[in-house]
Image (cartoon, rainbow, N blue to C red):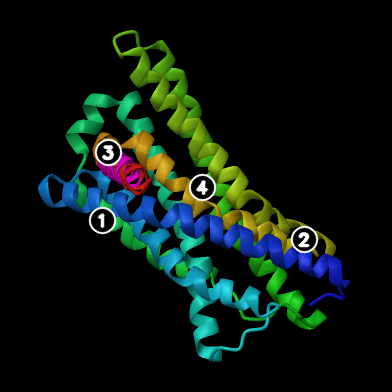
Amino acid sequence: MSPWDTSACILYLGLYMAAYVIAFVLGFPGNILAFYTFCKKVRQKPTPIDILLLNLTISDLLFLFFLPFKMHEVANNMFWNLPYGFCKLSIFIFYMTIYNSTFVLTAVSVERYLGVAFPIQHALKRRPVYAVAASIFFWIDSLNSTSVCYENFSQSELNIILPVRLQICVVLFCIPFLICIYCYVNFIRILSKLQHIDQHRRMRAMGMALGTLIVFAICFGPYNVSHIVGFVTGENPRWRNQALILSTFNACLDPFIFYMSSSAVRGNVGRVMKGVKNHLNRCLSCHMFWASWRGINNSEKDKEHKQQVINTI
C-alpha cells in the first residue's frame, strides 16, 4: 500500500465501502428478480437473448455473493485476515465476473443488431444452443483474467505482468467494446428509420442500447485504461484500484438493462411493485383503524372521567 496520510486513507476506505454497499444493496434484489424471471423463461421457451441475460445475471450474483468479503477487507483497513486461499478465490471471482460481463454484453449487442439488420435470415438461424455454446466459451475465456492478492510487484515482475495486462485489455475489453459500439450505433440507426415500430418501444430500445454503452464505458473503461497507462509508464498507476471501484457498479446497473431488454422482467417488476403498494396500503389502513379505535376509546375514557368528577362534586 502506498504511504497515504490518515485523512486520505479514511477517504479512500469510505469510498470503497460506500461503493460496495451501494452495489450490493441495489444489485442483489434486482438480480435475484432477474434470475427468477430468466430461469422461468428459459424453462418455458428458451431464446438466445434470454440465455445470454441469464448468464449475465448469474455472473452478477456470483460477484455479489463474494462482495461482503471485500467489505470485510475494507473494514480491516485493506488487510486480508481470512485464509489466503479464500483471498485467491475472491479475487478470481471478482475479475472473472467483470470480464465475463463484457463478453455477454457484447453478445447481447450482436444479437440485437442482427435481429434488426437481418430479421428474416437471423430468425431462421437463431438457435438457443448457439447462445449456450457462446456462454460456455465466455466463462472459460474469462478465466484468463485472474489477478493476485497483492499489488507490490518488483520491477522484474512488472516487466512480465504489464504486457499480460495489455493483452487482457485488448482482447477482453477493447475488441468487445468496439464490437458493442458498432452493433448498437447501427442498431439505433436502423431503428430510427423503421416507421412501423411503436414510438415508445423504439425509444426504450434506443435507451437500452445507449445505457449499455454507457455502463460498458464507465464501469469497465477506467480500469482497463489503467492497463494501457501501466504498460506505457512501466509501473502500476496509483489510481488503478480507485478505477476498479467503478466496475462494482456494473452489478447494480445491469438490472436496468434487464428491465429495458425484457418484457418479462418489466412484468415481474410491475407485479412486485403492485404487491408492495398493496401491502403498504393495508398497513396504512390498519394503522389508521387502530389510531381511530384508540381515539374512540380515549374519548369514552375522558367522558367517564368527567362523569366521575361530576359525581364526586
> Is 22 positioned to the left or the right of 62 in the image?
right
Marks 4 and 3 in Cβ contact (< 8 Å): no
Marks 3 and 2 in Cβ contact (< 8 Å): no
Rendering coords of residue 28 (x, y %): 41, 57
- How far apart are the two marked residues, 4 and 3, measured between alpha carbons? 53 Å
> Mark 1 or mark 4, which has the lower sequence index?
1
Crowd tier of the residue under label 3, counting other residues whose Cα lies within 10 Å: few below 14, some 14–19, many 20 or above: few
> Is 2 positioned to the left or the right of 242 in the image?
right
Q: Which residues are magenta?
A: 277-305
What's the residue at 62%, 59% (across, down)? 18
Look at label 3 and name its amino acid.
Ser
> Mark 4 or mark 3, which has the lower sequence index?
4
Rendering coords of residue 307 (x, y %): 31, 42
In the picture, the quarter occupied by the N terminus is bottom right
Rendering coords of residue 168 (x, y %): 59, 62
Residue closest to the far left: 44
> Mark 3 or mark 2, which has the lower sequence index?
2
Q: Secondary structure at mark 3?
A: helix
Crowd tier of the residue under label 2, counting other residues whose Cα lies within 10 Å: few below 14, some 14–19, many 20 or above: few
> Mark 3 or mark 1, which has the lower sequence index?
1
Task: Tell me which secondary structure the magenta stretch mostly adopts.
Answer: helix
Q: Which mark is residue 285?
A: 3
What's the residue at 21%, 39% (across, down)? 126
> Mark 1 or mark 2, which has the lower sequence index?
1
Q: Is residue 185 above or below residue 77?
A: above
- How far apart are the two marked residues, 3 and 1, measured between alpha carbons? 49 Å
| Residue beneath disc 2 | 239
Look at label 1 and name its amino acid.
Val
- How far apart are the two marked residues, 3 and 2, measured between alpha carbons? 53 Å
| Residue beneath disc 1 | 132
Look at label 2 and name its amino acid.
Trp
| Residue beneath disc 4 | 176
